[in-house]
Image (spheres, rainbow, N blue to C red):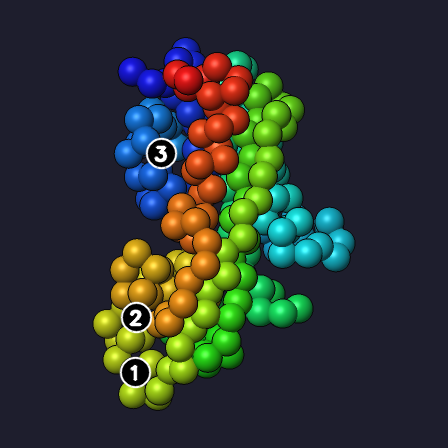
Amino acid sequence: MLWLAPHPLVLASGSAVRRALLESAGIPVEVSVADLDERVVEAQAGPLSPTEAAIRLALEKALAVATPRAGQLVLGADQTLALGQTRFTKPANAEAARNQLRNLSGKTHELCSGVAIAKDGQVIFSHCEIAQMTMRPLSKRFLDAYLQAAGPAVTTSVGGYQLEKLGIHLFERIEGDHFTILGLPLVQLLGFLRREGFVLA
């Protein structure tokens, strides 16, 4: 066993992708979704860069779940998407996804993936990684077909796509770590866990 901590890592997120990434890396996971209104957290924090927002949301999720869990490690994570100074959030419906994809078509945007670990009500690690995503020009015919094929999944991820699924068809160039793109900077997270003795070095 590579995992040395006495309890499973608590994931303060309902993301099946993040859970699968952790479990594939040999990390036992317990899911406890943070009850958090992300837009309220951002409003209270004031103006934030995409990187700052990803980290702030990740640490708030971790802290929301860590407080009643003595001695357990709680992982919060969040991902933001920025096109220049414009921030994107998860589209509310298929039409909102269509509008987002039209705006991203033919341009390069940034995915900022933040992660935080909290223990006993204190944040003990936080980090953010950025990936550069260049979307190819998207025709109306393609967008119609993509939105129909992807279905409700377009509303579950920022930007209206999931790279590990049909979203790969949207791109002509990608620069960045694969795990970062999927929403969890796993290499940096594992480095912290090894340094602190929670994972076998």
Marks 3 and 1, how far apart at CA: 34 Å
Q: For mark 3, does the 10 Å Cα neighbourhood hold few (<14), some (14 to 19), or many (20 or more) residues?
A: some
Q: Earlier in the sequence, mark 2 or mark 3?
A: 3
Residue 199 percent location from the top left of the image? 41, 19
Amino acid residing under circle 2: His
Secondary structure type for disc 2? helix
Any mark on residue 142, and which? 1
Any mark on residue 1, and which? none
Query: How many numbered circles are shown?
Result: 3
Q: Quadrant of residue 114?
A: top right
Left or right relative to 180: residue 144? left
Q: Earlier in the sequence, mark 3 or mark 1?
A: 3
Residue 133 percent location from the top left of the image? 46, 64
Residue located 30% across and 56% down the image:
164
- Asked if the residues shown at circle 2 and circle 3 are in contact, with their CB atoms under 8 angstroms apart, the answer is no
Secondary structure type for disc 1? helix
Residue 61 in sight here:
no
Left or right relative to 59: residue 12? left
Amino acid residing under circle 3: Leu
- Asked if the residues shown at circle 2 and circle 1 are in contact, with their CB atoms under 8 angstroms apart, the answer is yes
Q: Quadrant of residue 21?
A: top left
Residue located 37% across and 70% down the image:
171
Residue 56 percent location from the top left of the image? 64, 44
In this view, which residue lies farthest toward the left? 149
The residue where tag 3 is placed is 22
| Nearest-to-viewer mark from 2 and 1 | 2
The residue where tag 2 is placed is 169
Secondary structure type for disc 3? helix
Residue located 39% across and 58% down the image:
156
Residue 47 in sight here:
yes
Residue 50 against residue 93 in the figure, above or below: above
Q: Earlier in the sequence, mark 2 or mark 1?
A: 1
